[in-house]
Image (tube, rainbow, N blue to C red):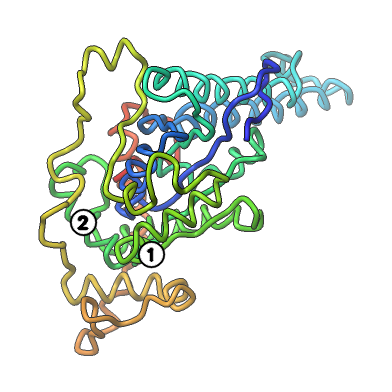
């Protein structure tokens, strides 16, 4: 179960939960956190905020260095100086640095729960933006296992739009079109690793609602973990574990896990969409919904009375809306220079 680390020691297996914000990924993470062989930190944003910028700068510097080197070789008078890490390091050096940081996250997560459990076999990371960085995850951690949570895009859009007017005001999309696009981007990004069939598992939110213990059995088998450790899957489905925090931080925060009041939505009436919003989401997600089997339901009946032309926004408006969402996401984490960051549900 353990995997080699950059320092030569063995570490628990690394797994990632993928999915769009408001798809139930945090719910699944908290339930799995109650398993005695699993530890999971709060969203680390490791790939989007730390490693993705590192690799973007590295790739740019390599291109600049190669261009300047070619100019020097051909005797061009305007050849630029050869500067930066690319003059002394290679790709494997940067990959080693990326793996070392990931190894530290895994190692520290295990240490953070050492007083509670002494047999952590899997460390799970869950940040929604991971779906947009699966190529990077594969580059530095090619044995990663992926659990992809998929939810009906109409429910996701309704929840996102509702969050935009409350606790998610700094990042959640405010329009049906932007919400649909966010769902599509995360779904397609996550499915890029579906080619690794032995390391990729899709789980439906709706199936978890209908039979959480059954889905947990599937997931634990996928992770090579015993379903009966610490109780049955049915018992595990009734519990929620805590995130791993470094001891000094846990001591200061006590036993409280801080989340927005409306974060979980438990006990609340489900949010809805107007007829036009529903049609916009359905129009944008039509092909993927058909593939996934998300057709008309009692909750989402067909809306033939709404004019389809009303759901096709001007291209410029769509682009502007999409960029506004991304700017909001970056403001939420205090970093304006990282594209593709999406905080979680």
Q: Look at 48% across and 52% down and name the residue there.
A: 219
Residue 198 image point, x, y percent: 65, 54
Task: Identify the residue position indicated by label 2 in the image.
Answer: 161
Q: In this view, does 249 lie to the left or right of 66?
A: left
Image quadrant assignment for residue 171: top left
Which quarter of the rendered picture does the N terminus lie within? Answer: top right
Image quadrant assignment for residue 56: top right
Outermost residue to the top: 248
Residue 186 image point, x, y percent: 44, 54
Task: Identify the residue position indicated by label 1 in the image.
Answer: 315
Q: In this view, does 265 lie to the left or right of 134?
A: left
Front residue (pair 76, 168): 168
The vertical placement of 7 against 12, above or below, is: above
Can you tell which of label 2 and label 1 is closer to the viewer? 2
Q: Distance between the residues labelled 2 and 1?
A: 21 Å
Front residue (pair 235, 11): 235
Which quarter of the rendered picture does the C terminus lie within? Answer: top left
Residue 74 image point, x, y percent: 89, 26
Q: Look at 33% across and 55% down and name the residue there.
A: 23
Front residue (pair 222, 160): 222
First in sequence: mark 2 vs mark 1: 2
Q: Look at 63% across and 30% down and name the residue there.
A: 2
| 10 Å crowding of disc 1: few (<14), some (14-19), many (20+) | few
Q: Is mark 2 on a helix, strand or loop?
A: helix
Residue 314 image point, x, y percent: 33, 67
């Amino acid at each position: 179960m353990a995997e080699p680390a950059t320092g030569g020691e063995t570490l628990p297996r690394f797994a990632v939960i993928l999915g769009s914000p408001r798809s139930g990924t945090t719910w699944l993470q908290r339930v799995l956190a109650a398993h005695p062989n699993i530890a999971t930190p709060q969203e680390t944003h490791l790939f989007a905020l730390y490693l993705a910028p590192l690799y973007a700068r590295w790739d740019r510097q390599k291109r600049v260095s190669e261009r300047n080197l070619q100019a020097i070789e051909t005797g061009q008078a305007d050849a630029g100086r050869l500067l930066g890490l690319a003059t002394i390091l290679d790709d494997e050096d940067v990959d080693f640095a990326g793996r070392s940081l990931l190894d530290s996250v895994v190692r520290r997560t295990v240490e953070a729960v050492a007083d509670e459990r002494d047999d952590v076999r899997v460390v799970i990371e869950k940040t929604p933006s991971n779906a947009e960085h699966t190529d990077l995850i594969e580059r530095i951690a090619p044995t990663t296992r992926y659990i992809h949570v998929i939810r009906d895009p109409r429910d996701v859009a309704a929840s996102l739009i509702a969050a935009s007017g409350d606790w998610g005001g700094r990042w959640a999309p405010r329009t049906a079109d932007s919400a649909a696009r966010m769902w599509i981007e995360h779904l397609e990004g996550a499915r890029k690793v579906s080619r690794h069939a032995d390391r990729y598992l899709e789980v439906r939110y709706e199936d978890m609602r209908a039979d959480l213990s059954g889905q947990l059995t599937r997931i634990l088998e996928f992770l090579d973990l015993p379903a009966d450790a610490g109780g049955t899957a049915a018992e595990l489905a009734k519990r929620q574990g805590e995130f791993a925090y470094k001891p000094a931080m846990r001591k200061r925060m006590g036993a409280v896990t801080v989340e927005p009041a409306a974060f979980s939505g438990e006990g609340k009436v489900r949010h809805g969409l107007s007829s036009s919003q529903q049609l916009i989401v359905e129009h944008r997600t039509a092909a993927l919904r058909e593939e996934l089997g998300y057709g008309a339901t009692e909750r989402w009946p067909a809306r033939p009375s709404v004019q389809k032309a009303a759901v096709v926004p001007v291209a410029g408006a769509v682009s502007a809306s999409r960029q506004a969402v991304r700017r909001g996401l970056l403001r939420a984490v205090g970093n304006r220079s990282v594209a593709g960051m999406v905080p979680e549900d």
